[in-house]
Image (cartoon, rainbow, N blue to C red):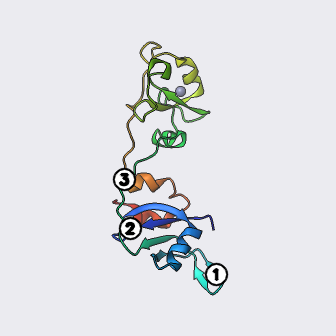
Amino acid sequence: MHELVLVLNANFEPIHVCSTRRAIGLILAGKAGMVVNGRGHIRTISRLLPRPSVIRLESQVHKPRPRVKLSRREVFRRDNYTCQYCGKREGNLTLDHVIPRHMGGQHTWTNVVAACSSCNHRKGGGKVEEVHMRLLHTPKEPPANASYIFGRHLNENLEWEPYISGW
Ligand SMILES: [Zn+2]
């Protein structure tokens, strides 16, 4: 019941993900319809329901365009699990503040990057220029499109792809 379900707005725009339990609740309440199933069935008290993978809300909800929330995991994903100083993919990644926090650097998308532990160590508390290091890319906020936002669930939910692409 904890498998994720993709929720589409009435106009088919993907807006969020919820648990199977919540999706079934929405369907039973008549607030959403099944778009994709194929995950087997769930027995409720009175009936056997196909297990949803994608549902669509019956009425359009107003929802501002979601933004990617800044977190360790999302920074690593934006940076393709690659150290932004040396380009290595192996080893333990850490979160580096390009302008160190003690020098007033902010905890924002444009000031955090993935760094391997040896680059992070080498950089210490210094600024990039001072320690003769260089960033491979200028860090930016990730795009707020559905492919990016829901893309991290795609490996386990390939059937979502056509509902996500293009939004
Ligand atoms: Zn590195």
Q: Pointer 3: what residue?
A: 145
Q: Pointer 2: what residue?
A: 9
Image height of 134 relative to 165, above or below: above
Locate residue 19, reporting x and y percent.
57, 64
Q: Nearer the viewer, residue 74 or 33?
A: 33
User: How far apart are the alpha carbons under marks 3 and 1?
Assistant: 36 Å
| Amino acid type shown at disc 3 | Asn
Numbered mark located on residue 44 in the image: 1
- Decide if ligand 1 comes within 8 Å of the CB at mark 3: no
The residue under the point 42% across, 22% down is 134
For label 3, the crowd category at 10 Å Cα-Cα, with few meaning under 14, some 14 to 19 and many 20 or more, is some
Local SS, label 1: loop
Local SS, label 2: loop
Locate residue 78, reporting x and y percent.
45, 41
The residue under the point 56% across, 60% down is 156
Local SS, label 3: loop
| Amino acid type shown at disc 2 | Asn
The reply to whether discs 2 and 1 touch (Cβ–Cβ < 8 Å) is no
* N-term mark: 3 or 1: 1
- The answer to whether residue 52 is visible is no
Locate residue 114, reporting x and y percent.
51, 33
